Amino acid sequence: MGPTAPFAVDIDRISLLGEPLMGGKAATVGSLRQAGLRIPDGFCITTHAYRRFVSHNGLEPLISLELGRKPLEGMRWEELWDAALRIRLAFLKAPFPTDMADVISEFHEALGREKTLVVRSSAPGEDSASASFAGIHESVLDVIGRDSLFRAVRSVWASLWSDAALLYRRELSLNPLTSSMAVLVQEFVESDVSGVAFSRDPLDTSAQTAVVEAVPGRCSDLVDGLIDPERWVLSRVDGEVLTRSVGKDELEANTRKLLLEKDLKMIWRILLRIESLIGNAVDLEWTGRNNGYTVLQARPISTVARDNDETRSWYLSLRPAAKRLKALSERVAGILIPELEALGHRFNEECLTDRHDNTLADALTERLEAVEHWRKVYWDEFIPFAHGVRQLAQYYNDRVCPDDPYEFVGLLKGENLLALERNQRFEQLAMTLKANPELFQATRTYTKDLAEERRYQGFLTQARTLPGGKQFVSALEKLLEEAMNVSYGSHRLASHPEHLLHHLIELAQLPTGQRSLEVHSKASSRMELENRLFSGVGTENRAEAEEILAIGRLSWRLRDDDNILLARLESQLLKAMDIALKRLSDSGRLEDSSGIAKEEDIAIVAAALRDPQHPPILLSREKKVKSNDLGNRRKEKPRQLLGQPAAPGTTTGLVRIIEDVDDLPNFKAGEVLVCRAIEPTMTHLVPLARAIIESRGGMLIHGAIIARELGIPCVNGIAGVLHLLKSGDLVTVDGFLGIVTVGAPEFDLEQVTLGS
Amino acid sequence: MSEFEEPALAGLFPATMAEEDPGVSIQDQIRALMFEQPYAVLCTQGGGQPYGSIIAFAVNQDLNAAVFATPTATRKFRLLSECDHVALVVDNRSADPGDISHIHAVTATGRAVDLSNYDAEDHWQKLLIDKHPVMHDFVCAPSTALIRIDILRYFHVTRLQEVYQWAPQHPSQ
């Protein structure tokens, strides 16, 4: 494509220029319009314009930098989402070159400045028989005015770099860095009825049928899955209607036919015409009825394997539509979380120790089933709802265009996360220790010796007699019962009061305000950011912004809480398992009572409980292998490791690797906490940490959330960090840039004298 | 009990991927750079002043020594005579100048040895000329000194900021 390639082309000239410049969608609608089909007026902003925009604003190096932070195949979805968020913001903030802006404005003027427009992606190769990007790239509806048009074009271009687009392109082995995108701008046309139609039913393997679906009003409600359509299956031989079905909404309303026989005939003829023009079975979006039919878009039906298509659907499910999120928020907050919380409470209230063997086995099975059920709920509903924060992030960035892509996090400050509430109680206990030297001393002495159950009881008795001790013990017991009754790995944290006391001693010794000294936060207040958002959206969209903000905040809070509540449930399963194993051990039905039982053993344990004569069972004990046990497989030493800048600040300290519950008591205040990921159940360690390093990456994962709340530098997403570092290593953590420097600079090796 | 997290793209991204050792050998990457790149920047120092010069170089198979030639009347030769602590910077930035994240670079640190007084000079001369045949006359000129750098350590940089250190073995160690 030479320097004379146009920035924009009228829809009537599209068919002359071809797909590399126009993209798949525009090239198709251009050729259909050329062939006389009714297609809305419009113009196409070419891939040349996209490339010029990218080079004019230096976006290519930025994209390379974001995607080159680590190998693409090693990036988790959260990390790709973060990269996509940063890239999107860069696109939204980038100005159009003046000459390009003038050309687009001229085309806009010619189309009608006041008209409502639809702005669609049109990437080369996006809709072909071998790949379908349907729904992956963005379309923007209801665009009115020049500024909105320019904003829509930027966001459509940026959607080439969305998380779903990057993942799907990689799935198809397409190089994201060579991708480009044209944009189709058309007049928005909406008739009485809209829908989709397939000249060959993609679900019919015999390829004998076609399908038409219709909804009242606009097509986007159908495409987004917000309305169940009325559906007709037609014979591919003559277009005759074979079956008709209606969505459940229609069924309840006892139905009217959105399309008559003659309408279906008309759509069938359009389908055949387009199929013959494109040379492939097609699906199309249409709108019309009494005043004829307009084709909104058409594309070849992909012949790729179904599971590939399912993969695309899965990527799309990563970002549920706004209406689905709203419905989810009501269900999650109103029904699921209270149910989960109540179940945890009920289990906690149940006394299992005096139960008969059979009913103990019932309780064990019931708890296992409950845990399995709630894990499924977690995946099916809690995780999709977690997207509420991401929806807020994109909404805020799109409207406000802030300098910092994570400025929106300030809107979430002050939400009452369970983990933070627990940390506050933790700090209060530490303050009590600090204020009462005798109590502090007694607690320290206890944590330095072996901590057996009877010694713990002895400690409590002694502590109660010391100044401040009564309240301390009462608050401690309450914290253990209410907040630490969660699982961590295969352990209940409540079963290890010595760990909690050890961390309280560490926290009590921490100089006040030490952490915040090294952080240079410029965070604006929650109120300032709210005002920024509301003025960005304008009064007409204030209600929409408020709703997205409310969903985002709820999603943020529950994202953490649901993990803790689920861990409480798991803790109750572990408690039942402990009691059951003791029962079996006492009655000679357990071969070896050492080690940790696994969840897979529950059925065997329950069976043994139900049979008093059961021969001794042998459990498949978990054998732990720590990362450093495997040895550092590299001969090279890491000097500087690159991850994601998850919480700002820089600091230097000694590494402490935390891999399981045995590592918890080794953690000392002021160390750099290195782990696979901070789980919501271990966030009480975070206030003690000088900095956090995680192998799992993402700006919105728990470690990053808590670190940012507490002002602790955090770098995450360093693959293999548990192998690369070991406890005691000196590291400098740069949470601004996502860099961890290992060791101090030295040239000791270079001082040696070698022989010649 | 299992740990919970957001989708790890089951079936597409193995869940353990993030934990795995990055895998590709840094040594292989260093070897590729040192053999494929014809030129390096030699860093010397003198009078408290660092100095950089571009040189044509070659390395041996063990990667523990590099060799280059320089006229004896040059500033770098004089600086080397005063202080044998040197560094070499080798990179592939010319391969993809538009993409900074694709640059691989290595800084080799070590000690410089003037080979004019050693028997093995022919061996090192051949190594250099084999890689740079066009420099034959320059390397063999009476006013040229052949310098070997005993490399003690490599600092390998990728993705702008990811740095690993590797120390090659020396027969005398």
Image: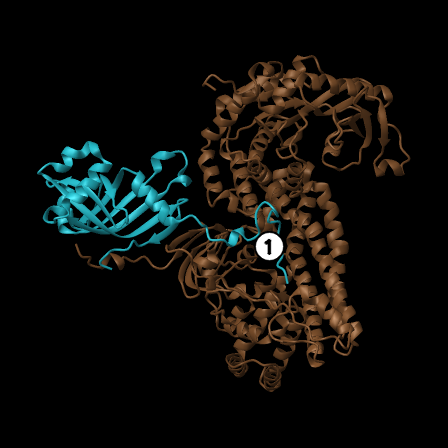
Quick one: A667 or A303, which is closer to the camera? A303
Q: Which chain is brown?
A: A
- Tell me what hue chain B is rendered in: cyan
Q: Residue drawn 65% across and 13% down?
A: A34
Q: Callout 1, which amino acid?
A: Lys
Question: Residue A88, image x and y in percent?
Answer: 55, 38
Chain under label 1? A
Vertical order, A507 against A290 (above or below):
below
Identify the residue shown where x is 67% and y is 64%. A599
Query: Is residue A440 left or right of B151 when viewed as pictured?
Result: right
Q: Farthest left residue? A: B142
Residue at figure coordinates x 86%, y 23% from the top left: A260
A508 above or below A715?
A: below
The location of residue A56, given as percent across then percent down, is 45, 29
Q: Residues within 10 Å of mark 1 (few under 14, many from 20)?
A: some
Dot 1 lies on which element? loop
Place of residue A291 in the rendered image (x, y in percent of width and height, measured from the top left): 80, 17
**Corner quadrant of residue A263:** top right
Q: Which residue is mark 1?
A: A413
